[in-house]
Image: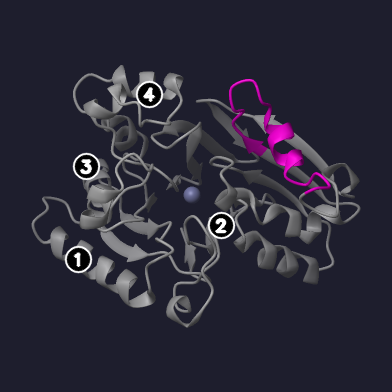
């Protein structure tokens, strides 16, 4: 399985001199299992340049686009994904409904004429939708498991297993606390909160179990620990929580992801350094790196 990062930034694109090494595009990953299938994780602005790369081959493109959720930073590249407007291409957009609002409506509404000159229905590629809750599906020889995570709305994590190797992708997730389950500040939908509340002991073991023994865990690390104190209930983690999940799950490699838009390249370097320092005192030591645009990994 090959993985390439096309967008690693959370919330809003952040181009500029201070983010040039890690990149400023919002989430998008290319995942190629060792068969004919192509998986695209999230459709943030990174999907735009990935689309242009795909167009260069002049070959028909078939892919599954797996959306963790439909906040702007995870869908805002889709209208600029040019292979979707090319005859002969076929895409299946996979994600969660939002209560009574179907995934298809959420996605097509972002291209209504008041937002965008080209309407979704005019796209020339064949586009299918597949709605998931917590379940397991197969695409080619790849197994994909989903789990709701602790982020406003309905947000999925994906566990992708192929050829005995596992990649766990949790782009947006916050530590679940008992206080949160009673808080009016909590914007996570009730059915998801209830899933965390049902867990005996530490509710975050839902996430640890999901990431158990993963070869790669990609996890939200938007904040530093001091920033997190000011941003509780925003739906994101600091790198310490990401590290705790990786250690408890005994993941092989932790990839810090969804970098804060306010973080410069130097800030991300410092976060990685601090994460590695914390590891010195841990009973289990995964590798820890930060996601960067253009980073490629073979599993
Ligand atoms: Zn996000």
Q: Which numbered disc covers residue 248?
A: 3
Q: Which residue is mark 4?
A: 193
Question: Which mark is in front, 2 or 4?
Answer: 4
Q: Which numbered disc covers residue 229?
A: none
Is residue 203 shown left or right of residue 116?
left
Is residue 172 shown left or right of residue 175?
right
CA gap, disc 3 to disc 2?
25 Å
User: Is residue 216 visible in this depiction of the protein?
Assistant: no
CA gap, disc 1 to disc 2?
25 Å
Residue closer to the observer: 39 or 94: 94
CA gap, disc 4 to disc 1?
31 Å
Disc with the residue nearer the chain's start (1 vs 2): 2
| Spot occupied by residue 203 in the image (x, y as percentages of width and height) | 26, 27
Quarter of the view holding residue 185: top left
Q: Which residue is mark 1?
A: 274
Question: Residue at point 38% right, 50% down?
Answer: 219
Query: Which residues, given as a range, are shown in magenta?
Result: 94-114
Is residue 205 shown left or right of residue 191?
left
Disc with the residue nearer the chain's start (3 vs 2): 2
Question: Residue at point 73% right, 33% down?
Answer: 104
Q: Which residue is mark 2?
A: 29
């Amino acid at each position: 399985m090959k993985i390439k990062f096309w967008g690693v930034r959370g919330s809003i694109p952040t181009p500029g001199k201070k983010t040039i090494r890690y990149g400023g595009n919002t989430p998008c990953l290319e995942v190629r299992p060792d068969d004919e299938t192509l998986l695209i994780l999230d459709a943030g602005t990174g999907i735009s340049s990935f689309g242009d790369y795909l167009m260069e081959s002049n070959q028909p493109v078939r892919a599954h686009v797996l959306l963790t959720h439909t906040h702007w930073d995870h869908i805002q590249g889709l209208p600029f994904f040019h292979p979707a407007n090319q005859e002969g291409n076929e895409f299946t957009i996979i994600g969660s409904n939002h209560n009574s609002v179907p995934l298809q409506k959420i996605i097509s509404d972002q291209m209504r004429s008041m937002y965008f000159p080209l309407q979704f229905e005019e796209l020339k590629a064949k586009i299918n939708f597949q709605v998931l809750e917590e379940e397991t599906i197969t695409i080619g020889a790849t197994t994909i498991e989903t789990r709701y995570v602790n982020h406003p709305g309905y947000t999925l994590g994906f566990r992708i297993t192929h050829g005995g190797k596992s990649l766990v992708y949790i782009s947006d997730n916050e530590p679940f606390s008992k206080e949160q389950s009673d808080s009016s500040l909590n914007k996570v939908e009730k059915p998801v909160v209830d899933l965390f509340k049902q867990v005996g002991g530490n509710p975050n073991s839902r996430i640890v179990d999901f990431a158990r023994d993963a070869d790669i865990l990609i996890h939200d690390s938007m904040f530093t620990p001091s920033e997190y104190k000011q941003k509780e209930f925003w739906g994101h983690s600091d790198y310490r929580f990401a590290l705790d999940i990786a250690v408890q799950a005994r993941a092989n490699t932790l990839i810090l992801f969804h970098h804060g838009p306010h973080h410069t390249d130097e800030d991300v370097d410092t976060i990685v350094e601090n994460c590695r320092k914390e590891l010195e005192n841990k009973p289990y030591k995964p590798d820890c790196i930060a996601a960067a645009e253009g980073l490629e990994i073979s599993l």
